[in-house]
Amino acid sequence: MLFHPLSLTSGCMFPGQHWGEWNDSQLHPTIQKLMKGYNKYLRPNFNEGPVEIGMSLDIASIDAISEINMDYTATIFLRQRWRDSRLVFPGNGNESVSVDGRLVSLLWIPDTFIPDSKRSFLHDVTVENRLIRIFSNGTVLYALRITATIACNMDLTKYPMDRQVCTLQLESWGYNLQDVVFYWTRGNDSVKGLDTLRLAQYSIESYYTSVSEAVYETGNYPKLVLHFALRRNVLFFILETYVPSTLLVVLSWVSFWISQSSVPARTCIGVTTVLTMTTLMMGARTSLPNANCFIKAIDVYLGICFTFIFGALLEYACAHFCTMQHQTLEELQRDLLRDFRESNGSGSILPARCIQPQQPVEIASCADEEDEREDGGRTRHPKAKSPDVASHQTGLKVRRPGGCVDGRCMSSVRQASRTVAHVFSVENPHNIDRHSRSVFPLAFLFVNVLYWLYYLCL
């Protein structure tokens, strides 16, 4: 669609006329000549082909990278170059005229924007940070200093050993590919500043540029993309999270060398390490997004440490329970043997090994064993005593010949259950601590090897 120059009088320059804040007396003579008949609302090469616009960037700083908001804030110098044949003036080609940045309102400029920008502003201290330079061949250099907060999609599954690839995209808002064409002026060398940039948690691993096009419902538009890879520095997290959590796991193992009778000491160590680990896990998650879709590497490690610490606390609970059970059985055996001796009128003390833990006490068999030992292998029978009286006085069931107890035969089910109970019984509860001293460290070392191989090598 063509526009008649007279229909856009607000964009045309005529001698003796005021143009916004400017008039003939304030403009350089060369600029006055260039502005005669210039229409800023029409792009260069109108109806003659697209305008080629070269881009280059200087990354002044990357101020912040937020995993919570998944964005980064950067200050950039954006430089755009294009040729406008209406601005040609006599010269040797390299001659240029630098004009005040406020004269941008008198020229046609590209409508470049950053599509992924959340917030951005143009610096204006002490004046708007713009530069306009016009060369004698009609080339226009337009530079801006911009600070923008730009979205960056992050994959935090390997946090804090992750590698993020962020982009900086430049597109044309209203001019499609038939109107303007974007290109990088010097390829990858069009971007400066990333090589010398220093960040708090990241290091710039690599970067490259690409030329693409943005497809929308209204058409295809030119697009330039800067890709840069960020590698997180894991040393900070090793000192802040990994080392403390590992030391807490080691601290929980100290209880294996403390006597089981020291209940307050072992309970205090177990509960303290569990609470401290819980606090460490909560602190590590405050600086991260709460999205449930991310199971991060640091969460996995903290979960492993918490499992081992909680397992150490459960180990003492099991060991203490077995110890108390074992002591109870020993006391019960002594009481039963004393009652049996008194009821039998025998002065000999039956050996404790005759009665196994978690098994029904068979006094007759033990007495037989004692009698056989006293008679040198000859079979002796205890003094006859009424089974009912003995059972009433000792609370025991006297085993009779033929496998019957108090006149009732033992069923095969009870015999099988007695055998199973004997197999799973703990003869020495102190062995639990003794085995835990080696099992827990070896298991933790094995899990650590798998963890670091997976997240560092895969």
Image: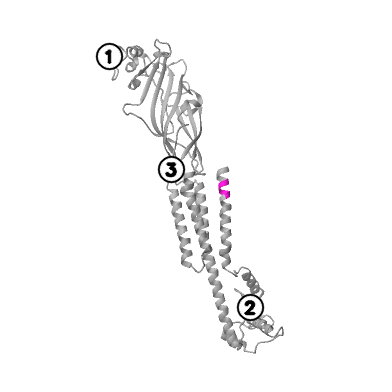
Q: Is residue 271 above or below residue 223?
A: below
> Visible in this render: residue 221?
no
Q: Measured from the top left, where is residue 76 in percent x and y?
A: 41, 30
What stretch of residues is rendered in magenta? 449-453
The Cα–Cα distance between marks 3 and 2, rounded to whole angstroms, is: 68 Å
Q: Which residue is mark 2?
A: 354
Q: Residue at the spot x=68%, y=87% of the render?
A: 381
Q: Which mark is residue 373?
A: none
How far across and down, in percent of the image, does residue 385 sit? 62, 89
Q: Are marks 3 and 2 in contact (CB under 8 Å)?
A: no
The C terminus - image quarter:
top right
Q: Is-magenta flag for residue 8?
A: no
Q: Amino acid at mark 2?
A: Cys
Q: Quarter of the image containing the N terminus? A: top left
Residue 322 image point, x, y percent = 55, 69
- Circle 1 residues within 10 Å: few <14, some 14–19, many ≥20: few
Residue 116's image quarter?
Answer: top left
User: Which mark, residue 25?
Assistant: 1
Measure the alpha-carbon separation of dots 3 and 1: 54 Å
Res. 77 in view = yes
Q: Secondary structure under badge 3? A: loop
Disc number lying in front (2 or 1): 2
* Badge 3 amino acid: Ile
Q: Provide the major secondary structure of the magenta segment.
A: helix
SS for callout 1? helix
Q: Which residue is mark 3?
A: 68
Mark 2 Cα shell of 10 Å, populated few (<14), some (14-19), many (≥20): some
Compare marks 3 and 2 and give the one earlier in the sequence: 3
Q: Is residue 199 left or right of residue 351?
A: left
In the image, residue 452 lies in the stretch drawn in magenta: yes
User: Does 407 appear above or below 221?
Assistant: below
Residue farthest along the front direction in this orientation:
257
